[in-house]
Amino acid sequence: MSLSNFASWLDATPLSTSLKDNFWAVPTLQSIHILAVCLVFTSAVVVSLRVWNLMGTDWNPHLWARRLYPPQWWALLVLLITGLLQVLAEPTRELPNPAFQIKMVGVIVAVVLAQWMTRQFYRGPEDVAARASVRLTSILLGVLWLGIIFAGRWIAYV
Amino acid sequence: MITDWAEWLGNSALSNYIQEDPTAFPILEVLHVVAIALVVGSIFIVDLRLLNLCSKTYRVSRLLKAVLPMTGIAFTFAVITGFLMFASQPVRYLHTTPFLLKMGLLVLAGANMLLFHAWTHRGITKWDDGDAIPRAARVAGLVSLILWVAILFAGRFVGFLLAF
């Protein structure tokens, strides 16, 4: 089964039809999706700024990471669920879309990096934020989320 | 009067450019989403502290100093990109209910913030590091949290409805 066949099959499923029939379903899912983006992106930016000593120095980077990473993982779960439902609502618009495909590759890389960062702050020694690998990955992750937001919005225009 | 201004803006060179360049509007949208993500995300950190739910060991006044500059910069970007999107077809925006709702909610969020800074924030040294955050500050945090979620929803509905 090709990707476009699969998208067409998904498009005809009862859940997809009911999401399409409900006019408010997609913008509501999009709004919840963006709300979760707020948590994930802000977490990445704040931890990165803290690691580079540019903000919130009353707390060490570990405290910031432990404050922001748990809600970030819940937000990522919300992103997955609302994202899947949006794909289900409009599979023929999303699955074959290059912007969507690029976004998914980006998301996989970002989740791996976010998992690595989380592990450093939860298991590593207290000065883990001084490591070049952590400092550079924090920037890379911020830039990656930026690209993912870009690709996500671009789905509507490809 | 505002309709005259909207019509004038809609016929300006700026408006024409944003309408005609196929990438101008989507780029503005992306930048607007990025700015909003930082505005809402950073405000949540403050609101949840005021509600005494998170960051309890961070002094409130210090947290405000740490986070609000980021909120301010991001909000400025959101206003600029938002205005440019509005400028693409101002008359249509003024006739879109969620847009008017969003503007009204933004005014309320601004008033809530001003009230907090002018009134509740004054005695902050008394409750800065403790758990006993006064009711007025908790209410300000809760109201802010609700308003910003509503602003975000209203904003997405503006984009969704105008796409038709």
Image (spheres, coloured by chain):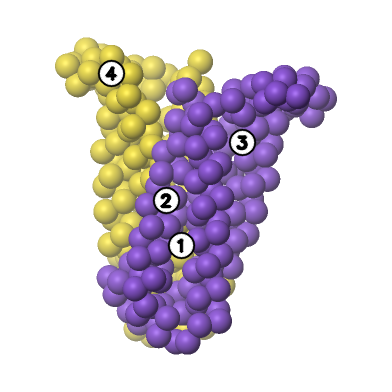
Chain colours: A purple, B yellow
User: What residue sits right under mark 2 in the picture?
Assistant: A144
Q: CA distance from mark 1 to mark 3?
A: 23 Å
Which mark is first along the chain, 3 or 2? 3
Q: CA distance from mark 2 to mark 4?
A: 26 Å
Instruction: Give a yes or no on whether discs 3 and 4 share a subunit.
Output: no
**Label pair 2/3, CB-CB below 8 angstroms:** no
Q: In the structure shown, which secondary structural element does the residue marked by tag 3 occupy?
A: helix
Query: On what subunit does the disc labeled 3 rest?
Result: A
**Can residue B115 be seen at all in this image of the molecule?**
no
Give the mark toward the camera: 2 or 3: 2
Query: In the rendered image, which quarter contains the N terminus of chain B?
Result: top left
- In the rendered view, does A156 fall on the left or right side of A57? right
User: What residue sits right under mark 4 in the picture?
Assistant: B21
Q: Residue at x 53, y 67 (%)?
A: A116
**Can residue B78 be seen at all in this image of the molecule?**
yes
Q: Amino acid at mark 1?
A: Ser
Q: Which mark is residue A28?
A: 3
Q: Position of residue A126 (x, y in %)?
A: 44, 87
Q: Amino acid at mark 4?
A: Asp
Q: CA distance from mark 3 to mark 4?
A: 29 Å
Q: Residues within 10 Å of mark 1 (few under 14, many from 20)?
A: many
Instruction: Give a yes or no on whether discs 1 and 3 share a subunit.
Output: yes
Give the mark toward the camera: 3 or 4: 4
Q: CA distance from mark 1 to mark 2?
A: 13 Å
In the image, residue B66 sits, relative to residue B18, either above or below, namely below
Give the mark toward the camera: 2 or 4: 2
User: What residue sits right under mark 1 in the picture?
Assistant: A43
Q: Residue at x 49, y 31 (%)?
A: A99
Query: On what subunit does the disc labeled 1 rest?
Result: A
Q: Amino acid at mark 2?
A: Leu
